[in-house]
């Protein structure tokens, strides 16, 4: 049985008397890509901002790998692997695709930044985890075949996976 990595249960978000999201529930399984579709003003951005922790929810629950995260601040959600991108995000054209994914993946590392400088603590184990995580992301996004290409040379559709 596949367990969802993200579960949203009866999510509600109000701004004063305006109900931007009312009783929204859905699940996302591992390696699944989900799209939110709807007209302007239907709550798509509010949903994403609520999941990321930019907006506190009015009621409901947000669970990441069976742990409630709706009370956590944004940076703790990022550390657990949940983050959002923006439509106007940009990439680093001179980086390779692999370097770009690696840069984005280092945000969730748990060792102290100085451990990288001095080579102590959990850094060595985390380096192996980082390589595994990058490989997984490249595979899921379909970017494995272009991992050594400069970001500026791949299609704009492929670049969207890096934003």
Image: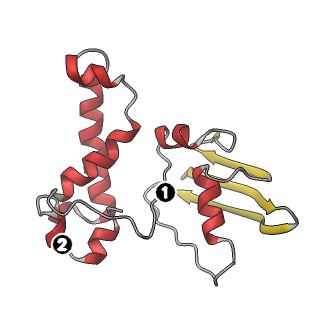
Q: Quadrant of the C terminus?
A: bottom left
Relative placement, left or right, of 131 versus 75 is: left
**Which label number is shown at residue 127?**
none
Badge 2: residue crowd in 10 Å (few <14, some 14–19, many ≥20): some
Residue drawn at 21 percent across, 16 percent down: 118
Relative placement, left or right, of 47 versus 106 is: right
* Residue where numbered disc 1 is placed: 84
* Residue where numbered disc 2 is placed: 154
Q: Say which element carries label 1.
A: loop
Image coordinates of residue 19 in percent, x first then y, are: 82, 68
Q: Are marks 1 and 2 in contact (CB under 8 Å)?
A: no
The single residue placed furthest to the bottom in the displayed view is 39
Relative placement, left or right, of 131 versus 50 is: left
For the residues marked 1 and 2, what is the alpha-carbon distance in whole angstroms? Answer: 22 Å
Badge 1: residue crowd in 10 Å (few <14, some 14–19, many ≥20): few
Residue drawn at 57 percent across, 73 percent down: 36
Q: Say which element carries label 2.
A: loop
In-front residue for pair 120/17 = 17
């Amino acid at each position: 049985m596949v367990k969802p990595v993200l579960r949203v249960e009866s999510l509600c978000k109000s701004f004063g008397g305006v109900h931007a999201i009312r009783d929204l529930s859905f699940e996302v399984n591992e390696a699944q890509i989900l799209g939110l579709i709807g007209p302007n003003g239907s709550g798509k951005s509010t949903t994403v901002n609520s999941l990321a922790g930019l907006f506190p929810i009015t009621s409901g629950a947000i669970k990441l790998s069976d742990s409630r995260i709706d009370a956590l601040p944004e940076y703790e959600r990022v550390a657990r692997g949940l983050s959002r991108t923006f439509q106007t995000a940009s990439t680093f054209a001179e980086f390779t695709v692999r370097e770009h994914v690696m840069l984005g993946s280092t945000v969730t590392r748990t060792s102290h930044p100085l451990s990288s400088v001095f080579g102590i603590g959990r850094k060595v184990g985390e380096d192996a985890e980082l390589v595994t995580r990058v490989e997984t992301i490249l595979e899921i996004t379909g970017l494995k075949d272009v991992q050594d290409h400069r970001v500026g040379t791949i299609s704009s559709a492929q670049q969207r996976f890096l934003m």
